Image (cartoon, helix red, strand yellow):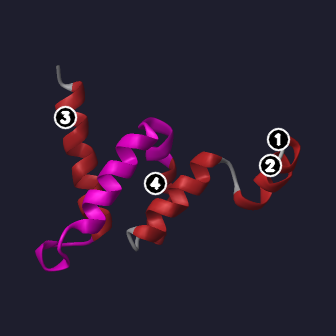
């Protein structure tokens, strides 16, 4: 697919950040908080978000107190503290 065709498809699917935000929200079963995911994809590197997404999704359900979305948020806050408190 050439660049021109990709640009034609972009309005259908949104930009890369919107697509990633929807992927995170859907994958974590947290679509009601889509705006939260839209904000984090603009703030953090995709590689970090995908790593935390995989960790939250892989965490055993019986050990999650609230939801996978809440766990993802916790992991992101922990990442923020560990990487920006220096």
**Does 24 appear in magenta?**
no
- Eye-nearest disc, 1 or 3: 1
- Eye-nearest disc, 4 or 1: 1
Q: As drawn, which residue projects farthest toward the front? A: 1
Q: Position of residue 18 (x, y in %)?
A: 60, 53
Please give the residue where the numbered disc 4 appears in the rendered image.
Answer: 37
The vertical placement of 74 against 63, above or below, is above
The vertical placement of 6 against 27, above or below, is above
Quarter assignment of residue 12: bottom right
Which of the two residues, 5 or 69, is positioned nearer the viewer here? 5
Mark 4 vs 1, N-terminal side: 1
Mark 4 vs 3, N-terminal side: 4
Please state if 11 lies on the left or on the right of 75 as rendered.
right
Q: Position of residue 50 (x, y in %)?
A: 39, 51
Q: What is the magenta segment's predominant secondary structure?
A: helix
Q: As drawn, which residue projects farthest toward the top? A: 86
Please give the residue where the numbered disc 2 appears in the rendered image.
Answer: 6
Quarter assignment of residue 77: top left
**Does 42 appear in magenta?**
yes
Magenta highlight range: 39-67
- Eye-nearest disc, 3 or 2: 2
Identify the disc placed on residue 81: 3
């Amino acid at each position: 697919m050439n660049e021109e065709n990709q640009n034609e498809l972009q309005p259908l699917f949104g930009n890369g950040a919107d697509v990633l935000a929807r992927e995170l929200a859907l994958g974590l079963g947290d679509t009601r908080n889509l705006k939260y995911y839209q904000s984090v994809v603009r703030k953090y590197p995709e590689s970090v978000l995908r790593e935390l997404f995989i960790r939250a999704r892989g965490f055993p359900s019986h050990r999650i107190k609230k939801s996978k979305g809440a766990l993802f948020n916790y992991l992101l806050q922990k990442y923020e503290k560990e990487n920006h408190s220096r």
